[in-house]
Image: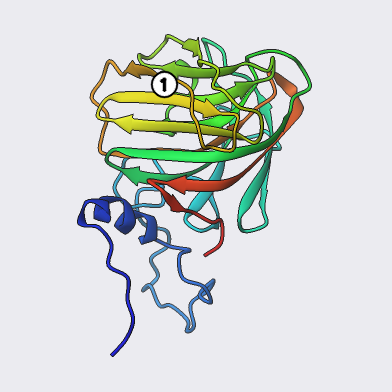
Amino acid sequence: TYSYIVDDADRIATIVPSAAGVGKLTGYASAPIAVDNGGIEGGGDGDGDGDGDGGDTGAAIGGGWLAMNVGDATMDNTATSDGTGITMVGKGKFESSAQTFNYVYREVTGDFEITARLDSYTSPTAKNQGQAGILFTPDISQSSSNLLFAMSSKGGDGTYVHMYRLTAGTNGKTTQTAPTGSGDVYLKIRREGNKSYASYSLDGGVTFGAEKNKEFSVTLPEKLYVGFVVNSSDNSKTATAAFSNVKLNGTSLSFTD
């Protein structure tokens, strides 16, 4: 006999992708024996997941999370984790012609809800082109004005917003409705079909304000890339943000394998 946990069937589409792929098993950073590929080097389609969709180009940081620069690969952005939370340093800005930011993300399939505590956000300028928040996108290989996304975030100007690009070449944002309470800040974003819903909490995640929602002009694929973003509204200065207590569909996530 052995003990086990029974997961709900409707969560299989989320659980399976989160545990699939490389870097998920501890103790196997390298092959235990030499690998003979018959002289063949490389392989796959260059995106790390073998399906040719332009995803998974980031560096693994543990727990199924990947880190990458979006918009400018030369940015000296960083992401470090203590296992339960993550601290990110990023340059760049959100603007109509381009998006540049530090991104720590994972794949999520189907409808979902993700929440996280925003422990801190320090920006060099008080502008809403700098953001710290939770962002999802259907294709991280896109850049500039073609990157479609939705985000629940706090701006460098101190406002909480639902920022989005629903159609290539256009940007938008709506200020999120202020909830009641005073305490730890929590951000939330969820996907329902082609819509995104964003809100935040000021009482430790007990009460969230009224959701702001937007619908994409294209049909979103089942698989999206979801994670944390930080930038500074300046391509030469850095902002720092820290996130913790991350939950996906009510299940806690860590940043360790």
Q: Return the residue nearer the eye: 176 or 92.
A: 176
78 versus 166 height, above or below: below
157 versus 119 height, above or below: above
Q: Is disc 1 placed on a helix, strand or loop?
A: loop
x then y, percent, for residue 133 = 56, 30
- Residue sitting at 33 percent across and 31 percent down? 191
Residue 61 seen in the current view: yes
x then y, percent, for residue 242 = 67, 40
81 versus 203 height, above or below: below
Quadrant that contains the N terminus: bottom left
Side of 15 where 80 appears, left or right: right
Label 1 is placed on what type of residue?
Answer: Glu
Q: Which residue is mark 1?
A: 211
x then y, percent, for residue 196 = 36, 25
x then y, percent, for residue 30 = 53, 74
- Residue sitting at 35 percent across and 60 percent down? 20
- Residue sitting at 56 percent across and 56 percent down? 255
Q: How is the image coloured?
A: rainbow
181 versus 68 height, above or below: above
Q: Return the residue nearer the eye: 34 or 7.
A: 7
Q: Residues within 10 Å of mark 1 (few under 14, many from 20)?
A: some
How many marks on residues?
1
User: Residue 72 occupies which quadrant of the picture?
Assistant: top right
Most extreme residue toward the front is 181
User: Residue 4 occupies which quadrant of the picture?
Assistant: bottom left
Q: Return the residue nearer the eye: 78 or 192.
A: 192
User: Residue 103 occupies which quadrant of the picture?
Assistant: top right
Q: Return the residue nearer the eye: 19 or 36.
A: 19
